[in-house]
Amino acid sequence: MSTAKPQRPKARLPRGFRDRTAAEIAAERKVLDTIRTVYQSYGFEPLETPAFEFTDALGKFLPDVDRPNEGVFSLRDDDEQWLSLRYDLTAPLARYFAENFQDLPKPFRRYQVGQVWRNEKPGPGRYREFTQFDADTVGSNSPSADAELPMMVCDALEALGLKRGDFVVKMNSRKLLDAVLGSAQVDMAKRGAVLRAIDKFDRLGEDGVRLLLGPGRKDESGDFTKGAELNDDQIAQVMGLLHGKVDGGMDDLNAISAILTASGYGEDRVRVDTTIIRGLDYYTGPVFEAQLTFPMKNEDGEEVVFGSVAGGGRYDDLVARFTGQQVPATGISIGVSRLMTALRSRGLTGDLKPLIVVLSLDDAARAFATARELREAGFRAEAYVGNKRFGDQLKYADKRGAALAVIEGGDELANKLITIKNLAAGADLAKSIASRAEWLSERQAQKTVARDDLTKEVRAALGVR
């Protein structure tokens, strides 16, 4: 008889992925609903595309192209076709628009929220799976289509509770960068490395960007990132762009700014900033980045400015990959996971309704009936379904974070009464109580009321009308 121990998998998560609790999910749901309401008020309608796309349909636009799979998670299907998890929601939109071109209104306006995946090096606050909330207009080359996007993001951030001055939407144009790179005679093969370097300006500063434009840079962990290998004159011209020393190429930004100003969105909310480039290669014109301006504490307790929570821009060539015909398009994406962290620091996220646990004692059917009564009155209530020991039931309610425990034992039933225990006021009590009799003798943070007054008393205990 074999005595070998069974091989069991280790309970663990891959790097860059995380589990999310009920509280996190509830908070995110409130944020998504708020953004959705704003986007729909502008006339955008929802669209859902699948998590997997054909790899060639997604294209190679990610800034982190030196890693395996070029920044995406891929697999080969049983028909030998390569599939990849989407790395954003824009490339799938381009595929959808090209596939359904004849049936869609022009311009086509949609929003989409969903998970995206990137095979990148994870770090603090940087995950390989995260949520994005996009809005795009496909089929319009008007600057009004571009101007609408920062307006909408401003409205969404304010609807979430952020104040004027807590954020700013910065905008620039890829046409400025194209002009500078052309003047500096930078090889097209180096363009991607230049974009990635400039996109790190707010994080690495001037010295870090200069290194990435030149020979390369070693980060704090010792990892070396190869640079674009520009010469000193080329670096100087690119840095001139970052410092606003540009001539011409501002027509599209001026047109957008005029629309924003006329619509009441001044430089306190949206303004031009030539350091904003965006790392994705498919942008062709104006680009946007919404940044938070208030300080926060990082994992080490240090005070930092959080930075970008949304970005996007014009991508007039993306649909042409499928159709051969240029189709103008512009869009913006909110990084929901990053935004949630910032909102949580300001106490602006939602939560689940307070939970009420109806202890079953020796009559589960009665507990289910009482829980259903509370739910019909608009509360979140559950009937306890574990063992019958009263102490265990109370400990369960406490560990669940319940606001109230409702008890209807034989004595209460005989006298048409019911007991409401405020667990928030006496959370430590459950740790030492073994019996219902002992609990009743404490008479702390509890109230026995007429059975007919249950919902009224629960509202009073929760402080709701």
Image (tube, rainbow, N blue to C red):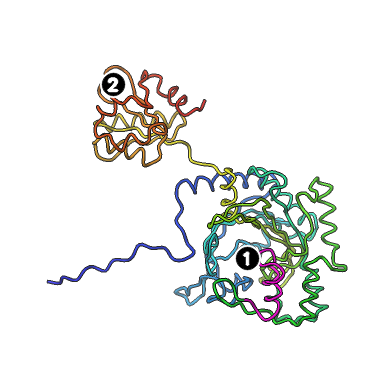
Query: SS class of the residue under badge 2?
Result: helix
Marks 2 and 1: CB-CB under 8 Å?
Answer: no
Which residue type does callout 2 highlight? Leu
Q: List x then y, in percent, for residue 352.
A: 48, 40
The quarter in which the N terminus is drawn is bottom left
Is residue 280 visible in this depiction of the protein? yes
> Vertical placement of 34 versus 417: above or below?
below
Q: Looking at this rendering, what residue extends furthest in the right direction?
A: 248
Q: Choose the circle earlier in sequence order: 2 or 1.
A: 1
Q: What's the residue type where badge 1 is placed?
A: Ala
Name which quarter of the figure residue 227 lies in.
Answer: bottom right
Q: Position of residue 225 (x, y in %)?
A: 61, 77
Relative placement, left or right, of 248 versus 8 is right
* Viewer-closest of 235 and 86: 235
Neighbor class of circle 1 (other Cα within 10 Å; few <14, some 14-19, many 20+) is some
Residues under labels 2 and 1: Cα distance? 62 Å
Does residue 7 show up magenta in the picture? Answer: no
Residue 36, placed above or below residue 423: below
The magenta region covers 196-217
In the picture, the disc for residue 130 is: none
Report helix, strand or loop for mark 1.
helix
Q: Give the residue at mark 1.
A: 91
Of residue 301 and residue 325, the one placed in the foreground of this image is 301
Q: Is residue 249 above or below residue 465?
A: below
Magenta portion: prevailing SS class: helix
Q: Tell me the residue that label 2 is attached to.
A: 413
Q: Position of residue 193 (x, y in %)?
A: 67, 76
